[in-house]
Image (cartoon, rainbow, N blue to C red):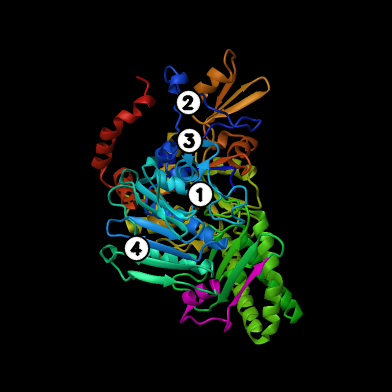
């Protein structure tokens, strides 16, 4: 993969091809000096205290301020209640959304501590937990062996981003209560009447200043989140209640969730009425003796697929969903793959050696949940587990049970093995078809002076460079890695498909050769799987003409095969325009501004040699490889589409379409942005 990949929206990189710093010969990145902005002193340093950082930058803590982030607040509060249940201190959790949109989570656990905190005189532990980031009972491991709230910021972040929060604790024989607004306490903690109850209740109303007036809790989403938590720990009961006025679909107003079989019940609900390869799923639980570490899993396979997907895998760590997977999922895949291969060898099935993890999970429905101490996640929102211990734990947990499950039911095991081997053979057939297509496309082109294809047959890692002219093509062919890099020289500026008729586009030999080299068809017939290369790289000169050619190519790809761009397979190479040398030191600049900057900084007071590359064909192959083509040193800009694709359609029609008056108007409206590039 490229050493670094910039993100470039459609046309941005083509029209302004200089987003990255030049590469020096020693390959160390050149750091640009900051722009001159006037005085800068201690008074300019802003210190955010308490929960102010959360309100200033909520995206750092909950990933944004959209609907998904809003529901993450519920997840944080529910995680705390679940931690009490998993630790054996709570059996009941109640979730209630009232008519005003206030959400409450109540548990019958030990209750948040209310005694004075030793490090914060005059404040109760409850108040400290609510207003101080990185406070809580989950760091030492004494209060919780495992917990979902690793970072200790969850409930304080909820407090910071809520208009109003009320916390009630039934602790030490009394009821205690304290209220907060936007992260700040409203008075101190109140000691109410005596009680025999124990537990905690937190109710909150999200702040509309943060999330906007139109964003509100979705009962259906809250309902699913609460139900999935109950599946993850069989020892808890969760009661759901929602005011009917908030419900606008089939979500029930009241429900009780209790699933003693855990993930096995979860999977049964997910795959009901779907044909499966084996009568019973592979499900079980494992607890590491004498140590902290639990695993629960449930897996089944189906030839019919699961709705819109062939297969699915859902994973959890300490009851927290990990939608991006991680090490526990890797352990599950490894254990299943190793077990099936061993069974194939035991039963004399020689084709078992073809099996990969991809084949095993291709049409599987899999659930895995782990409980470990001090889990490591990528990001505060805990979407991917990175703890290496989790993979070892899951592999060890599944190894013997899966072997026993296979050998105990030979008929089902044979059916599963045959099913997975069939997936493997289909995968190999697809790969072979692609390799044949690559060879076929090369033969059909019969353009030895044009397409210089890869010598390797693998799609992964293969890339094709589209360059302008035979001269640039000659340098690129010498600079490339023959095994993985193909070169296709194009003859000058290609046809502008945005202004040409469909007949003219279809009859254009240059574009036909390009599509034939890629192995794809245009329009509705485009299939990403047909692509003969992992990456398509537009490599043009670092000047206005090169930017124009790149724009024409991007227009062609957007109009003919937009899914290529959506899949992130289209890139722009970023070659330099200048080479500056003095003594034994050489650096490359991508444009005039960079050239002037390097002269004023790296070569200040010196008289270096300045060479301007007239084009890629003027560069020595070693220079082209070093600056633009070597994956370990180069920088590529990925072409992307903005979320509002109708804006892209309008932009393409304006800049590249048949009506020059639209371009004229665009130039008039945007002329002020070009002043810096003019010598006036």
Q: Which residue is mark 3?
A: 19
Going from N to C along the chain, the mark reached first, 2 or 1, is: 1
Q: Is residue 10 visible?
A: no
Label 2 and label 3: CA atoms lie apart by: 13 Å
Q: Which residues are magenta?
A: 262-287
Which residue is the site of mark 4?
Answer: 219
Single out the mark in the foreground, 2 or 3. 3
Task: Give the distance between the C-alpha atoms of the residues marked 2 and 4, in whole angstroms.
Answer: 57 Å
**In the structure shown, which secondary structural element does the residue marked by tag 4 occupy?**
helix
Which dot, 1 or 4, sits closer to the camera? Answer: 1
Q: Does the CB distance between marks 1 and 4 fall below 8 Å? A: no
Percent x, y of residue 59: 43, 44
Q: Secondary structure at mark 1?
A: loop
For the question of whether residue 214 can be seen, the reply is yes
Query: Is 268 part of what is drawn in magenta?
Result: yes
Task: Find the distance from the CA under tag 1 to the CA under tag 4.
Answer: 31 Å
Q: What residue is disc 1 on?
A: 113
Dot 3: few (<14), some (14–19), or many (≥20) neighbours within 10 Å?
Answer: some
159 vs 122: above or below: below
């Amino acid at each position: 993969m490229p050493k670094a990949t910039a993100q470039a929206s459609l046309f941005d990189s083509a029209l302004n091809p200089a987003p990255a710093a030049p590469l020096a010969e020693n390959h160390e990145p050149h750091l640009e000096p900051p722009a001159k902005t006037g005085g800068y002193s201690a008074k300019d340093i802003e210190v955010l205290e308490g929960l102010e950082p959360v309100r200033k930058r909520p995206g750092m803590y909950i990933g944004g301020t959209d609907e998904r982030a809003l529901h993450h607040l519920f997840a944080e509060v529910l995680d705390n209640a679940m931690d009490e249940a998993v630790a054996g201190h709570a059996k009941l959790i109640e979730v209630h959304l009232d008519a005003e949109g206030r959400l409450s989570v109540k548990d019958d656990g030990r209750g948040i501590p209310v005694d004075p905190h030793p490090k914060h005189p005059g404040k109760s532990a409850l108040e400290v937990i609510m207003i101080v980031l990185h406070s809580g009972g989950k760091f030492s491991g004494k209060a919780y062996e495992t917990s979902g709230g690793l970072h200790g910021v969850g409930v304080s972040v909820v407090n910071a981003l809520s208009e109003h929060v009320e916390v009630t604790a039934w602790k030490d024989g009394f009821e205690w209560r304290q209220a907060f607004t936007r992260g700040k306490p409203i008075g101190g903690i109140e000691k109410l009447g005596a009680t025999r109850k124990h537990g905690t209740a937190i109710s909150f109303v999200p702040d509309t200043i943060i999330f906007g007036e139109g964003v509100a809790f979705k009962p259906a989403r809250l309902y699913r989140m609460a139900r999935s938590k109950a599946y993850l720990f069989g020892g808890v009961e969760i009661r759901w209640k929602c005011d009917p006025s908030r419900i606008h679909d089939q979500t029930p107003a009241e429900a009780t969730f209790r699933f003693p079989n855990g993930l096995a019940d979860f999977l049964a609900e997910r795959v009901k009425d779907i044909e499966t390869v084996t009568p019973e799923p592979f499900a079980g639980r494992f607890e590491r003796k004498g140590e902290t570490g639990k695993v629960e899993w449930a897996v089944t396979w189906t030839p019919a697929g699961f709705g819109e997907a062939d297969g699915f895998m859902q994973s959890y760590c300490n009851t927290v969903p990990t939608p991006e997977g991680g090490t526990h999922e890797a352990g599950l895949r490894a254990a299943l793959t190793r077990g099936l291969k061993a069974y194939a060898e035991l039963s004399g099935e020689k084709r078992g050696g073809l099996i990969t993890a991809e084949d095993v999970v291709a049409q599987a429905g899999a659930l895995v949940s782990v409980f470990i101490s001090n889990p490591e996640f990528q990001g505060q929102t805990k979407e991917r587990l990175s703890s290496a211990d989790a993979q070892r734990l899951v592999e060890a947990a599944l190894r013997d049970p899966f072997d026993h499950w296979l050998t105990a039911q030979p008929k089902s095991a044979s059916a599963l093995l045959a099913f997975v081997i069939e997936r493997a053979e289909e995968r190999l057939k697809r790969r072979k078809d692609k390799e044949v297509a690559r060879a076929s496309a090369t033969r059909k082109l019969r353009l030895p002076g044009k397409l210089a294809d890869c010598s390797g047959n693998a799609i992964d890692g293969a890339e094709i460079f589209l360059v302008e002219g035979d001269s640039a093509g000659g340098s690129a062919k010498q600079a490339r890695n023959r095994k993985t890099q193909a070169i296709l020289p194009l003859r000058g500026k290609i046809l502008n498909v945005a202004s040409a008729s469909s007949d003219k586009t279809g009859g254009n030999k240059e574009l036909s050769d390009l599509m034939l080299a890629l192995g794809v068809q245009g329009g509705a017939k485009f299939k990403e799987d047909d692509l003969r290369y992992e990456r398509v790289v537009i490599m043009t000169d670092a000047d206005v003409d090169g930017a124009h050619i790149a724009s024409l190519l991007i227009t062609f790809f957007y109009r003919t095969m937009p899914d290529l761009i959506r899949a992130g397979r289209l890139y722009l190479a970023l070659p330099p325009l200048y080479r500056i040398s003095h003594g034994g030191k050489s650096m490359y600049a991508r444009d005039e501004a960079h050239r002037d900057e390097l002269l004023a900084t790296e070569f200040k007071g010196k008289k270096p040699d300045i060479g301007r590359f007239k084009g890629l064909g003027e560069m020595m192959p070693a220079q082209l490889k070093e600056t633009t083509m070597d994956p370990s040193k180069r920088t590529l800009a990925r072409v992307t589409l903005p979320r509002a694709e109708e804006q892209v359609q309008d932009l393409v029609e304006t800049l590249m379409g048949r009506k020059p008056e639209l371009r004229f108007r665009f130039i008039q409206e945007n002329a002020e942005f070009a002043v810096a590039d003019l010598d006036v």
